[in-house]
Image (cartoon, grey):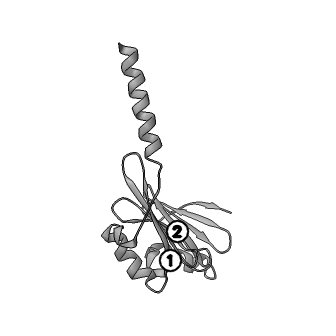
Amino acid sequence: MKKLGLIISAVFLTLGVACADVDRPISVNELPQKAQKFLKEHFSNREVSFAKEDPELLHKEYEVVLTDGTKIEFMAGGEWKSVDCRYGSVPAAIVPKQIKDYLAQNYPQAVVLGIDYERKQYEVRLNNHLELTFDKNFRLIDIDD
């Protein structure tokens, strides 16, 4: 009987993981309010190509791709997780002031092409092929080329 319980649990876990990885196309109006506000503030002059909901095992994430190739990922509550501008620069208002100040002092000619925020760290991708990682106190902790 104990084995049967383990088998049933394994089947439900497998089904749960399989179902959790099915992306669903959505309209911009279905994004969390915080994500909609972010798009209006920073990308109002760009058109949305598509948006999708990415259900994870315990939460949802969202992805928006603009017609110019910019990709923006949002966490469940609508907070931005990453902004990747393939053919342009990340809007300056998105980059925290401390990081902008560091870049102005150390890489004045560099352009921010992408920024990720995860686990209290910021990773910034520059047009000079450097990736800089900052901790939650905005101290540089890694440089990758």
Image coordinates of residue 123 in percent, x first then y, are: 53, 63
Image coordinates of residue 4 in percent, x first then y, are: 39, 17
Q: Residue at x 45, y 41 (%)?
A: 17
Hey, what amino acid is under mark 2? Answer: Ile
Hey, what amino acid is under mark 1? Answer: Lys
Q: Is residue 103 left or right of residue 145?
A: left
Image coordinates of residue 32 in percent, x first then y, are: 33, 67
Q: Residue at x 47, y 87 (%)?
A: 45
Q: Is residue 126 left or right of residue 38?
A: right
Kindly identify which residue carries mark 2: 115
Kindly identify which residue carries mark 1: 100
Camera-side mark, 1 or 2: 2
Above or below — where is 131 with respect to 86?
Answer: above
Above or below — where is 72 with respect to 16?
Answer: below
Above or below — where is 4 with respect to 140?
Answer: above
* Along the line of sight, the residue nearer the viewer: 103 or 113: 113
